[in-house]
Image: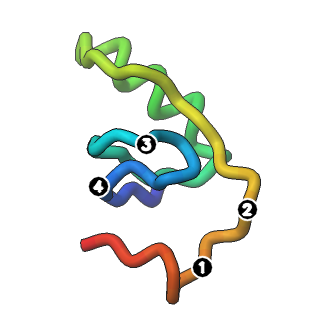
Amino acid sequence: MYAQISPTPRELSVCCGISLLIHQEDIDTIRKLAEEQELEYIGIEGLDNEFNNRRHRYG
């Protein structure tokens, strides 16, 4: 499973924020873990564009 903490991409929010980048196939697992650990989160959203290493530099 892949996960990386990063600033929230501009495509999802105009405000500052922290996001966890994950692969689409891991969404159900992440959602279940968050529920089991009683973690609060705003939502799980997807991006419609390809990840670009030159533009999307986090960390």
Number of the front mark, 4 or 1:
1
Quadrant of the rendered image containing residue 5: bottom left
Question: Mark on residue 17?
Answer: none
Mark 1 and mark 3: Cα distance apart in space: 19 Å
How crowded pointer 1 is (Cα within 10 Å; few <14, some 14-19, many 20+) is rated as: few
Q: Are marks 3 and 4 in contact (CB under 8 Å)?
A: no
Mark 3 and mark 4: Cα distance apart in space: 18 Å
- Amino acid at the residue labelled 3: Val
Mark 4 and mark 1: Cα distance apart in space: 16 Å
Mark 2 and mark 4: Cα distance apart in space: 19 Å
- Amino acid at the residue labelled 4: Ile
Q: Position of residue 55 (x, y in %)?
A: 51, 80
Where is mark 4, residue-wise? 5
How crowded pointer 4 is (Cα within 10 Å; few <14, some 14-19, many 20+) is rated as: few
* Precedes in sequence: disc 3 or disc 4: 4
The residue that appears at 37% across and 13% down in the rendered structure is 35
Q: Residue furthest bottom?
A: 54
Q: Are marks 1 and 2 in contact (CB under 8 Å)?
A: yes
Where is mark 3, residue-wise? 14
Question: Mark on residue 49?
Answer: 2
Where is mark 1, residue-wise? 52
* Precedes in sequence: disc 2 or disc 4: 4
Mark 2 and mark 3: Cα distance apart in space: 17 Å
Number of the front mark, 2 or 3:
3
Secondary structure beneath dot 2 equals loop
